[in-house]
Image (spheres, grey):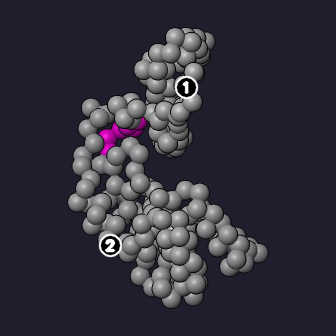
Amino acid sequence: MDTVRVMHEILESVRDGDWDRFYTVVIQIVAEIARENPEAGRRLADLLTQTQIRRPGRSELDPLPPDVPRLSVGPRRVPPLAMRIYIAGPMSGYPDYNFPAFFDAAVRLRAAGYDPINPADTGIHEGWTWSDYLRVAVGRLVREAQGAALLPGWESSRGAELEAHVARTLDMPVKPLEAWIMDGESTSVQDTSHV
């Protein structure tokens, strides 16, 4: 990527008020980043589609227009900007902290077209208390999630009950894992935008 040329195009497009060209250059930058680091490219694309831009001389905010090309990195069954679903379920008192159920849920959610947030990814840390794990988990739920999937046994887990309560309080959809899987499978379509 020729950085000088890209910066020149961005500056010219802003100066000229040519927002179509501005968005096109930004999308090209995201695609270039995604080639080097697909996860960083996806997160940047997520951020850009949620960002609102104030055009010079206007007081209101303009969202990125819906016709701006969406990032697609290779063939995939999920839309490039999949809904982020937090996995809530019991861990304490289970063999291996119930991690296998969390990892299985993440695989199934991804296959159904979602972007799972798996608290088991935090792993085991010597010296951490239950509260330490919960702080990290609830922080991820609040900052990253758009919904919560409940694993079997969630209602007998203090942590999972709290996570479900927080998600509902924040007006996120909360439902059993199987309901998310069925909804995702019935609405996902083959993404061919990369072809």
Q: Point out the frontmost of discs 2 and 1.
A: 1
Viewed as shown, does residue 31 lie left or right of 113? Answer: right
Residue to which mark 1 is pinned: 58
Label 2 sits on what residue type?
A: Glu
Q: Is residue 127 above or below residue 30?
A: below
| Image position, residue 54 (x, y; %) | 56, 29
**Which of the two labelled residues, at mark 2 and mark 1, occupies the earlier sequence position?**
1
**Residue in the foreground of this view, choosing between 3 and 35:** 3
Residue at the (47%, 35%) spot, across then down:
63
**Residue in the foreground of this view, choosing between 18 and 175:** 18
Give the farthest residue toward the front: 59
Q: What residue span does the magenta drawing correspond to?
A: 71-76
Residue to which mark 2 is pinned: 178
Viewed as shown, does residue 23 lie left or right of 92? Answer: left
Viewed as shown, does residue 186 lie left or right of 62? Answer: left
| Image position, residue 121 (x, y; %) | 56, 64
